[in-house]
Image (cartoon, rainbow, N blue to C red):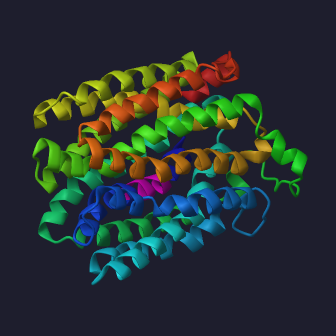
Amino acid sequence: MKKTWLLGLGLFSISFTWSLYNAFVPFFLEDFIKSVTLIGFMMTIDNYFAIVIQPLVGRRSDRINTFIGKRMPFLLIGMPIAALFAALIPWHNSLFMLVVFMVGMNLSMSIYRSPTIALMPDITPDYKRTQASGIINFMGGVGAILAFAGGSYLYKTHNSLPFLVTALLTLLCLAILLWVIREKRDSLSYMPSSPPTFTSFKGEWNKPTLFLIGAIFFWFFSYQGVEALFTLYGKNHIGLSEAQAGFSLAFFSVAFVAAAIPSGLLGRRFGKKRLIISGVIGLIITFSLITFVETMFALRILLLISGVFWALININSYPFVIALGKESSIGTRTGIYYIASSLAALTSPPIMGTLIDKFGYSSLFYTASGGMIIALLLVLGVKDRGMAHPISPEQQASAL
């Protein structure tokens, strides 16, 4: 568990960077682009790379063998480049340069995101993975809180400061991970997989996986659209300032962080599927209620509640995907997981932006609620292979 906490630094840096990116880059784009649809489209640049690069990198990281391991080479390449481009984003002097810096940051992050996440199941036994997922997502949530709360303060001082800080944190987290994690020593079974065949790749797309991937797509469709366009929603629909809108997202992240570790423990005790279903139903309700909110106080209360339900879903979904496949394909299935979430993030902001342009900002959370309803129907169709399994007293003791 100690190494799991330290491994969480990888997700901490990723979450910190993405939260700042989603909160403040729309304001940079708004200086050049007035259409919310087009801004929503521009905010999906990362997902074009993620759909293609992350599955390939994840699969490749199952097979290579270097002196620092299977996953670490991708972190060593991607994280410094991502830090550089993140620091450059606020220093654009034209739309072209802004897009160049955005593309550079997103491309480099696609290189190391899947291998970073795949390290968790590499060093964690199956019966403790929901607990470990809670820990690393707790770290990711802390990153989001610091990004939304501290980033809003830094942004008011100068819009370049949040991006400089995220660059420095990314480099610091990389240094710690390289120092602490030794894959060949820490992995439960360090064996690069054999070259893939068509049959082996087809086997990863079994029926339960297809239903679960469909559900993942739709709950990320709802989440990603809200996250990408929320600051504009807060500013233009509720009447918040840019800083207030960015800070309001911290309430969602605070609740996510508070619920992350309990969600992992509950998933291990009651089963991943049950926790996910509870979270999806909860978000259907809270997203529907937000559409009627017109004050900052009520909005932040509902965001707090929504963060708890999102933790039930997010903490248990990745271990659920891994549980439906083989241990030798962890990197591959990590890539499959990101195919679903990235496709959702690619399509959601432009679609929701178009609906906002036509029907107003109130359509944002109506659409998000609809996506969650479809996700619920799909996850109900997943076979109960991901439910809780009996564990021995020794396993129970070691999991505490």
> At 24% across and 30% down in the image, what residue appears?
290
Quarter residue 382 falls in: top right
Count of all numbered marks drawn on residues in the image: 0
Is 397 rendered above or below residue 116?
above
Q: Could you say where residue 374 lies in the image, as x and y percent from the top left?
A: 51, 27
Q: Quadrant of the N terminus?
A: top right
Relative to 19, 105 lies left or right: right
Is 213 rendered above or below residue 123?
above
Is 200 rendered above or below residue 297?
below
> At 80% across and 59% down in the image, what residue appears?
63
> At 54% across and 31% down in the image, what residue appears?
316
Residue extending furthest front? 358
Q: Is residue 259 visible?
A: no
> Which portion, as a residue range, is magenta?
9-16
Given residues 342 and 316, the one toward you in this image is 342
Given residues 288 and 305, the one toward you in this image is 288
Q: Could you say where residue 138 lies in the image, as x and y percent from the top left?
A: 41, 41
Relative to 144, 248 lies left or right: left
* Magenta stretch encompasses residue 8: no
Main SS, magenta residues: helix
Q: Could you say where residue 36 lies in the image, as x and y percent from the top left?
A: 29, 56
> At 75% across and 29% down in the image, what residue appears?
207
Q: Could you say where residue 122 lies in the image, as x and y percent from the top left?
A: 68, 47
Q: Is residue 346 visible?
A: yes
Given residues 346 and 299, the one toward you in this image is 346
